[in-house]
Image (cartoon, helix red, strand yellow):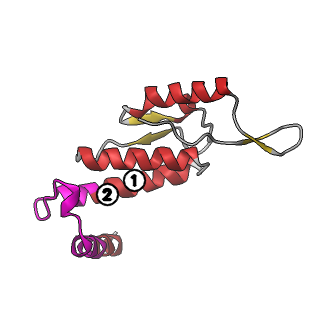
Amino acid sequence: MTSPVPVTSASPDTGTLRAPSRAQAGAEDAAWEREYGRDVWRLRELGIKDRSIAHITFTGIPQPWLKNLAKRWARWRLSTGQVAETAALSVLAVRRFAAFLASPAVNVDRLAQVDRSLLERYLAHLHADLRSA
């Protein structure tokens, strides 16, 4: 797995953006290597301290190909500074889509089977679910 783009941080002295030092970047890479394979990412282990959320969970995504895409996407978003809660809610949306894909009526088991027609079917399903809730 390649390293994410280094996240810049504001200097406490001047408020200007600065790239992390080599030591910080190495520690961030090691943290990502430890957490990436887990189904539940512990955000504090990644150096993300968000009061509203402590974990991002990928359990509930039974398709390995979709789980891998969701992890890559979430890692990229977190590495570019997206708020952790937003990333977690986005992964929740992927988990919901994964459940739809795994349902007996749909039974999608590879990315090549996901097309516009299927996405339109999912959006109709989602709309119906949200109306009945």
The magenta stretch spans residue 132? no
Which quarter shows the C terminus?
bottom left
- Give the labeled residue for mark 2: 96
Label 2 environment density (alpha carbons within 10 Å; few <14, some 14–19, many ≥20): some
User: Badges 1 and 2: C-beta atoms under 8 Å apart?
Assistant: yes
The x and y percentages for residue 49 are: 63, 37
Which numbered circle lies on residue 92?
1
The part of the chain drawn in magenta is: 98-125
Image position of 19 (left or right of 120): right
The x and y percentages for residue 132 are: 31, 73
Q: Quadrant of residue 18?
A: top right
User: From the viewer's perspective, is residue 86 above or below residue 12?
Assistant: below
In the orientation shown, which residue stands out farthest toward the right?
Answer: 13
The residue that appears at 50% across and 47% down in the rendered structure is 76
Between 50 and 68, the one nearer to me in the picture: 68
Give the structural element (helix, strand or loop) at label 2: helix
What residue type is disc 1 on? Leu
What residue type is disc 2 on? Arg
